[in-house]
Amino acid sequence: MTGPQTAPSRVLVASDLDRTLIYSAAAMALGESVVDPVCVEIYDDRPTSFIHPDALAGLVALSAATWFVPVTTRTRAQFGRIVLPGVRVTHAVTTNGGVLLSDGVPCPDWAAEVARRTAEGASYPEAVRALAPVWERPWVRTVRDAEELFLYCVVETADTPAEWYDELLEAVTALGWVLSVQGRKCYAIPPGLTKQAAVAEVVRRVGADAVAAAGDSWLDAGMLAAADHPVRPAHGELHDQGWSTPGLTVTTSAGGRAGAEIVDAFRGWTAPDGVGWSTVSSDNGP
Ligand SMILES: [Mg+2]
């Protein structure tokens, strides 16, 4: 495809969703309260995820001017539940880089490339077998597979002993896989399955000149390190580890307000010659 007709900018914006742009009610409250959050996901008849209204308005304007690419560890089905009204999305990356959607349709070429990239090292069935004994604990509520590319479990954090995370890390590391702990979810991901590889493929396909990227977890670190303009919120797995990379912007706010700051940063980086954008209102900002 060609770039948007109205786009003078050649900067592609690649962003994680959960706890970066969209938030559960609990994650929203990691920072100061957000007035009039917009519901963007309903699951089991319940409002589940929200976005700061300024972040949504900013994304609508941003996506009209350049490529906005959601990049999520959610499976394709989980991603499909999210509705960002007015936001233009031509490409999206789901399943931690395992699926590349072009106009909502998975690209078979990319699926074949992912199969090649994940062929080395421990396979998915090997990981299932090796991790099964570690999952079998009373605090592990559920174990899920993500399109048979990776695994994650959901734990009862209050009941989970710290030593168990060490045991899980040891088992995942022994496989040569990567562990990411995000709230109640613990992800075990093969090393060949990365967000940054899928983003690089989208950049190649659309012909972008530069990348602005945002994310909050260890699974976003590679994407941030590869980006020309990286930004992360002041909460989450990377923040807790004090993670940084050259040129990194860190928001001043935590929680849902950080999402608005991130979109504001994106708009600054994608503005033609650094001008032309109005600043996002910050009446409830820091
Ligand atoms: Mg996230």
Image (spheres, grey):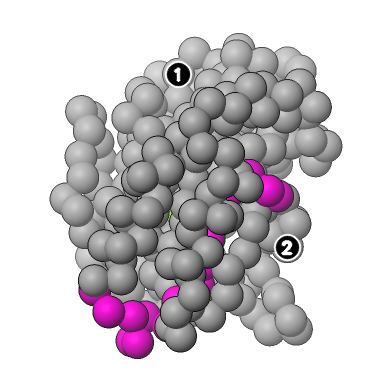
Residue 212 appears at what percent x and percent y?
A: 43, 31
Mark-to-mark CA distance, 1 and 2: 29 Å
Residue 174 appears at what percent x and percent y?
A: 36, 45
Q: Which residue is mark 1?
A: 210
In the rendered image of this protein, does residue 184 appear above or below residue 18?
A: below
Instruction: Give the class, few, some or many, for how many residues have Cα within 10 Å of label 2's Cα (few <14, many ≥20).
Output: few
The quadrant of the picture occupied by the N terminus is top right
Q: Is mark 1 within 8 Å of ligand 1?
A: no
Q: Quadrant of residue 248?
A: top left
Residue 13 appears at what percent x and percent y?
A: 51, 33
The quadrant of the picture occupied by the C terminus is bottom left
In the rendered image of this protein, does residue 202 appear above or below residue 163?
A: above
Q: Is mark 2 within 8 Å of ligand 1?
A: no
Assign a secondary structure to mark 1.
Answer: strand
**Which residue corresponds to the image point at 75% horizontal and 83% vertical from the top-left?**
45
Relative to 125, is 216 on the left or the right?
left
Q: Quadrant of residue 110?
A: top right
Assign a secondary structure to mark 2.
Answer: loop
Earlier along the polypeptide chain: callout 1 or callout 2? 2
Q: Give the residues in magenta.
A: 147-162
Instruction: Give the class, few, some or many, for how many residues have Cα within 10 Å of label 1's Cα (few <14, many ≥20).
Output: some
- Residue 62, magenta (yes or no): no
Q: Is residue 185 something one can see in this rendering? A: no
Q: Which residue is mark 2?
A: 81
**Which residue corresponds to the image point at 62% horizontal and 64% vertical from the top-left?**
144
